[in-house]
Image: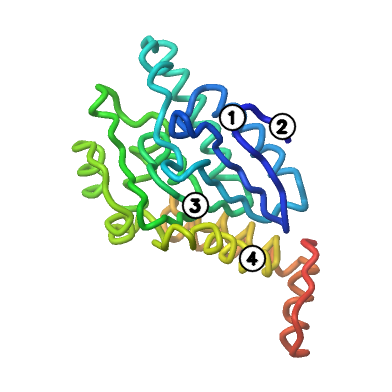
Amino acid sequence: MAYENILYEVKDHIAWITFNRPAVLNSLNTATVSELGDALNHARTDSGVRVVILIGAGEKAFVAGADINELAKRTPVDGKEYSLAGQEVFHRLETLGKPSIAAINGFALGGGCELALSCSMRVASRTARLGQPEVKLGIIPGYGGSQRLSRLCGKGIAHELILTGEMISANDAFRIGLVNHVVEPAELLPTAEKIAQKIIANAPLAVKYAMEAVEHGLEMPQEEGLFLEATLFGLCCATEDMREGTHAFLEKRQPKFQGH
């Protein structure tokens, strides 16, 4: 796919989405968010894509935040629409039905941190810096940060990061559960790809239903979540992959999943 602000490539069942505006630290403008939404639509409908990995071009930034030149011109009315449009694309990423991994290679601030929060998991370079500094600009997170950060790391952590606007190190992000792994810069992409390949080795529908159980169950009382889990478990039992997986285990061979 040819885009102006991002790169999109599918290789070995992985869709690589690279934010390609290194001169402005890969900041998010309206066009970039729109292109991301289009790329996600392609990833969703491409049966050859099993995992999505997001990365920033260059060595300095994953995504350093919103495009401030664009942001400074917002009015109350179009500011709300700007926020809702970004939320919709990030929600599309979160509910893609396919796992996503943010490979954070530098600054992940504001919208960049919110983008990472929308992914299924996060791997950070040891030199990465993360934060929600919107209050320093007189605004608040607008792409879901106030909601996802508190759900992932807890209300106290979310209050501290959002209200101070301070950046934290990759190690601190790992300590509070904001990232899953911290690795040396040279190991960032190999680590993300290794996780992706482990996921790809599993049954596609089981992966999809497991994600639904976690994502939707998190918003439900436990009893309702357990009912959802049982329902999705039952759907798995109707798949050819379930037969293949269980038979392969009993026959002591590697399963050949087809996604059916």
In-front residue for pair 244/230 = 244
- Whether residue 85 sits left or right of residue 158 in the image: it is right
**Upstream in sequence: badge 4 or badge 1:** 1
Up/down of 2 relative to 81, above or below: below
For marks 4 and 1, give the CA distance: 27 Å
For image coordinates 22% across by 42% down, the residue present is 159
Q: SS for tag 4?
A: helix
Residue that label 3 marks: 103
In-front residue for pair 40/250 = 40
Residue that label 2 marks: 2
Residue that label 4 marks: 197
Q: Quadrant of residue 72?
A: top left
**Upstream in sequence: badge 2 or badge 3:** 2
Q: Position of residue 247 (x, y in %)?
A: 77, 83
Q: What crowding class fits label 2: few (fewer than 14 Cα within 10 Å), some (14-19), or many (20 or more)?
A: few
Q: Amino acid at mark 3?
A: Ala
In the image, which is nearer the foreground, mark 2 or mark 4?
A: 2
For marks 3 and 4, give the CA distance: 15 Å
For image coordinates 25% across by 38% down, the residue present is 162
Q: Position of residue 115 (x, y in %)?
A: 46, 40
Residue that label 1 marks: 5
